[in-house]
Image (cartoon, helix red, strand yellow):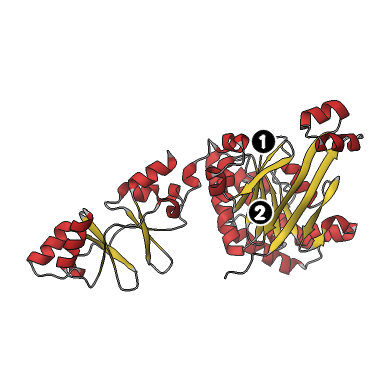
Amino acid sequence: MPSKAEVLLKVNNLYKLYGVNRQAARDLMKKGADKSEILKQTGVTVAVNNVSFEVERGKIFVLIGLSGSGKSTVIRCINMLQQPSSGSVIFENQDIGKLSRKELLEFRRTKASMVFQNFGLMSHRDVLGNVAYGLEIRGVKREEREYKAMEMIKMVGLEGWEHQNPSSLSGGMRQRVGIARALTNDPEMLLMDEPFSALDPLVRRDMQFELLSIQRKMNKTILFITHDIDEAFMLGDMIGIMRDGKLIQVGTAEEMTSNPADDYVRDFIVSADKSRVFCAKHVMITPSSLIRLSDGSGKALSIMKRNGVSSSYVIDDKMTFIGVLTLEDAMKARSENLSVESLVIRDVETVKEDDLIADIMPQAARTRFPLAVVDEEGRLKGIVSKAAVLSSIS
């Protein structure tokens, strides 16, 4: 039985209210009044309303919502850039709200690094100086901090640009500098507040892929804020949808797509690119015709005839996928007394169970046979047809 995943961050019953008459606002909240009604009656703005969630170590948790939903306020309450009105933020079993000023500063430097939307780079420092800055203010010696900074600069693909001024870089490159700077301190968690929203679509997609690659390499925990549903579905292991300060639903992209909590969630995700939600495992089927490499041509023909197909998937005794045998080749094997093994078509397209539909579309379009889905050991798990790919995104 797999061990339970470690929870790195717990947000419990978090509230953030702006205004004087907060008790009256709380009373109205208990009665079910919405955000606009509370503001009208009390003058209090409800930015965050009883938000609770957990983030597992090594995972990406995405908070998504429209402007004013409270998502950015939540992330600022986590590192206490804004003090919560009530509730708690527990990081590695420690209540962040109870840290001293010195302890909180150390927490921000070493435990939870922030990556901002506007990059926040210093124009009087070059790329290397920006990336190494966090280690510099911690008193790390120059040689050591620059060595570590160069590791991260290489990690984000900016080697050769380390002595350039940030003003000479593109938006995507500046954001890479921001990510490298956050990673140089080797934090347990990255807090990313709409870091890619200022980038053009193509650069944004590149940065999303880059972030996923870095996260898989370094196993960092990330809390990511966005208003883009496709970005949330692409990045998030778990996703939370916010509205008017409330957390409406938490789940995986697949769970939200197949079982939205309410009409708001349903309407929110209706425009999402489903090809970036569903994977091969969601649309694959078991092949109706399956033969072993050791089977003779007579048995192969019998299996194809019984299943009404003109080709069959070939496996070995350990279920390892070998290729495809066509009806024509099976007949040739029988008439010319050839082995099945000698006529198997082996250059058949394969995909993994967790490959996104968007990523396997080109393969599905060009392949002669349905895609073979295999695991890490090459064992056949199922097949994906062109029709299944098309129906999954319609």
**What is the x, y in percent for residue 186?**
70, 63
Q: Quadrant of the C terminus?
A: top left
Asked whether residue 170 is in view, the answer is no
Q: Residue at x 41, y 69 (%)?
A: 377
Mark 2: secondary structure: helix
Q: Residue at x 44, y 55 (%)?
A: 281
Lower sequence index among marks 2 and 1: 1
**What is the x, y in percent for residue 146?**
70, 64
- The foreground one among 392 and 343 is 392
Amino acid of disc 2: Ile
Give the residue at mark 1: 66
Give the residue at mark 2: 179
How much space separates mark 2 and mark 1, taking CA atoms?
24 Å
Image position of 274 (left or right of 214): left
Badge 2 density bin: few <14, some 14–19, many ≥20, Cα 10 Å: many
**What is the x, y in percent for residue 380?**
36, 64
Q: Residue at x 19, y 64 (%)?
A: 300
Q: Residue at x 63, y 54 (%)?
A: 60
Is mark 2 in CB contact (under 8 Å) with mark 1? no
